[in-house]
Image: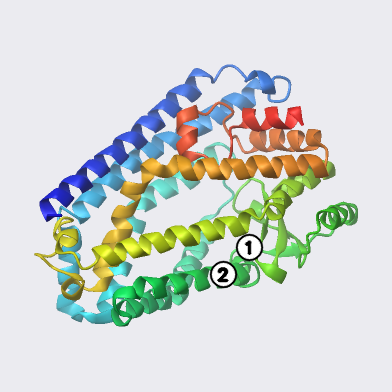
Amino acid sequence: MSSYHFTLLFLAALALSTVLRLWLDLRHLRHVVLHRDQVPTAFVGRIELADHRKAADYTVAKVRIGLIEIVLDSVVLLLLTLGGGLALIDQTLRAWLGGGYMHGLALFACLALIGFVIGLPASLYRTFRIEARFGFNKLTWPLWFADLAKGAALTAVIGGPLLLAVLWLMDIMGRHWWLYVWLLWLGTNLLMLLLYPTVIAPLFNKFTPLEDASLKERIEALLQRCGFASSGLFVMDGSKRSAHGNAYFTGFGRAKRIVFFDTLLEKLAPPEIEAVLAHELGHFRHRHVIKRIALSGALSLVLLWLLGQLIDQPWFYTGLGVGAGGTASAMGTAMGLLLFSMVLPVFLFPLAPLGSALSRRHEFQADAYAARQTAATDLIAALVKLYRDNAATLTPDPLHSLFHDSHPPASQRIARLGAA
């Protein structure tokens, strides 16, 4: 393939992805506004009209800022690639640092910093204006800065050495470097599953053992019925950042933990909490976590192999506005890896419904499992409260939902549970 044809292919994919994302969001916007003044039939008597309108307005506010981000992301990507921005950054860093691994690490750091700065206004607006306007934001500025500092430190401590190891493997392992990088990626992900519950998560939130004796007894009976062994039941202080509520289990092997947001425990009755946890245990029973890890591993292997085929092709670099007939040896493996990670989402977005369909299937299976272990009416009641209290729209545009939502629409979940 020539660089000219690859440029045309990239521009076509970017245009398709951008237009498709904008069209889907505009459809979603119109659909939510159109149904703003009428509660869906399945929720009449369960959701007040005022709450339904609040959810619609919350969704509209988020979609509007999202539309700006879509356009901005596409413009920035064009400026960095065909606009010569990335080439300029690369040349400047080479003049300061020469080539080698320091250049590669600095290149990724610069792009991460640029992405952070560009995305910061929308992120702040979403948190301190939209979330605050609808009563969800509990995050203070000191806590925001603390989270930012901790996140940056973790990225440097974990991400820096990992990236360095990847670049090193790409340099020394010959034609099949992608296989060794994949093994490193797989091992790192499994290690993070072990370390996250006890090492990383406590850096951001406080986890305390569940103290409610009656609720604990109810949950332990459910765990025994489901054959689930955990290392403990914990309550997370999610309320210090947001009024949204949730529950999840995290970890791997013996390090599995069950975590409840304190906001969830405040809003749901004990039978409803049990039903929500039964849903999460349904993912465990159907081995959804293992299946997703396996699928993610297979996909990452294919993508790394694809990068292995592209990284030595001159047209891959020149077609994206970097170098003049350069190859991985001339441009550095970091540039090839960075370019690939930047443009890959453009080509993959049209395939998003495939991932969403699989995720929805898993959610339906987990719901069905919960309905067998607890009363389906309790899970319905819990979901209705969560939809209401989290201001989740009950009337998403079906096509937009197909691309963006990992969970089935509320009406579909309630209908299936009602049948159960």
On screen, residue 71 above or below 311: above
Horizontal side, residue 315 vs residue 130: left or right? left
Count of labels in the image = 2
Q: Is residue 208 above or below residue 101?
A: above
x 62%, y 31%: residue: 410
Disc sitting over residue 205 in the figure: 1
Mark 1 and mark 2 residues within 8 Å of each other at the beta carbon: no
**Residue 128 shows up from this direction:** no
Q: Residue at x 43, y 49 (%)?
A: 123
Q: Is residue 191 above or below residue 136?
A: below
Residue 115 visible in rendering: yes
The residue at 84%/52% (across/down) is: 222
Q: Earlier in the sequence, mark 1 or mark 2?
A: 2
In the image: residue 270, left or right of residue 186: right
Q: Nearer the viewer, residue 409 or 118?
A: 409
The part of the image, by quadrant, that contains residue 227 is bottom right
Nearer to us: label 1 or label 2: 2
Please, what is the three-letter code of the amino acid marked with disc 1? Answer: Asn
Task: Please state if 7 lies on the left or on the right of 131 as rendered.
Answer: left
User: In the rendering, at what x and y percent does residue 388 appear?
Assistant: 66, 33
Q: Position of residue 110 (x, y in %)?
A: 29, 66
> Which residue sits at x=49%, y=34%?
401
Q: Which residue is mark 2?
A: 190
Q: Where on the picture, by quarter, is residue 209?
A: bottom right
Q: Which mark is residue 108?
A: none
Provide residue 208's location: percent of width, then percent of height. Answer: 75, 64
Q: Secondary structure at mark 1?
A: loop
| Of the pair 1 and 241, the residue shown nearer to us | 1
Q: Amino acid at mark 2?
A: Leu
Query: Which residue is at the front of the view, 64 or 398?
Result: 398
Residue 251: % across, % down: 65, 65
Instruction: Measure how far apart labels 1 and 2 are at the Cα level.
Output: 22 Å
